[in-house]
Amino acid sequence: MDYEILRKRMVEEQLIARGIKNSRTLNSFYKIERHKFIPENLRNSAYADFPVPIGEGQTISQPYIVALMTECLDLTGQEKVLEIGTGSGYQTAILAELAKEIYSIERFEVLAKRAQDILSELDYTNIKIKVQDGTLGWQEAAPFDRIIITAASPKIPLPLIDQLADNGKLI
């Protein structure tokens, strides 16, 4: 399977075709090998236009949703970002390409460990991962210029609002 061709097609047909325009965001999607964040038995779906199971009842979001949320953050490269829901680590890697520091919280230890291993193997040094309830945020590292909630939540948890920097953005 030629993942490079599939990745290029994903960017062109799923992202650009749907209006993702930010060149930095698009370049990160061209670069990051999404299949490395997918369980081996499901890698044939790595670049497909749907979420893929990653274990613990969780999924890696479809590429367009990851791109849309990332583009909405309006990252310049100088931000400190809090990500709620590390999951596979794919969104984390995208963020690490675009921001200065990434703090990511995952409630499932097995997912956090797997993501940390992949991200370390890919030589990311601007990411910190913690296992805990994401609704609590990461108080000791606050404030954050950007907060992205990639996990399901019925409402925005108050601690996250309190940890957002003045003029920050929460997606």
Image (cartoon, rainbow, N blue to C red):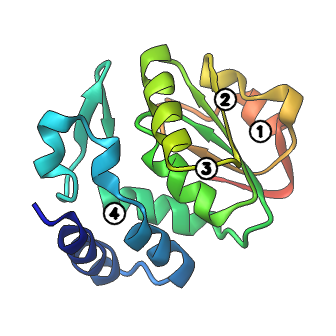
Give above or below for 130 relative to 16: above
Task: Give amino acid for label 1.
Answer: Ile
Q: Is residue 91 left or right of residue 64?
A: right
Mark 4 against mark 1, which lies toward the viewer?
4
- Find disc 2 in the rendering and name its residue: 157
Q: CA distance from mark 4 to mark 2?
A: 25 Å
Q: Residue at x 20, y 63 (%)?
A: 3
Q: Nearer the viewer, mark 2 or mark 3?
A: 3
Marks 2/1 in contact by CB < 8 Å: the verdict is yes
Q: Between label 4 and label 2, give the one nearer the viewer.
A: 4
Quarter that holds the N terminus:
bottom left
- Amino acid carrying label 4: it is Tyr
- Is disc 1 surrounded by few (<14), some (14 to 19) or many (20+) residues within 10 Å? some
Q: CA distance from mark 2 to mark 1?
A: 7 Å
Q: Position of residue 155 (x, y in %)?
A: 57, 32
- Residues tagged 1 and 3 counted as in contact (Cβ below 8 A): no
Q: Amino acid at mark 3?
A: Tyr
Q: CA distance from mark 2 to mark 3?
A: 28 Å
Front label number (1 vs 3): 3
List the residue tagged with mark 3: 124
Q: Which label number is shown at residue 64?
A: 4
Which mark sits nearer the N-terminus, 4 or 3? 4
Badge 2 density bin: few <14, some 14–19, many ≥20, Cα 10 Å: few
- Which residue is pictured at 33% across the width and 74% down the height? 15
The local crowd at label 4, few if under 14, some if 14 to 19, many if 20 or more residues have their Cα within 10 Å, is: many
Position in image of residue 56 (x %, y %): 32, 18
Q: What mark, if any, has residue 161 been given in the picture?
A: 1
Name which residue type carries label 2.
Pro
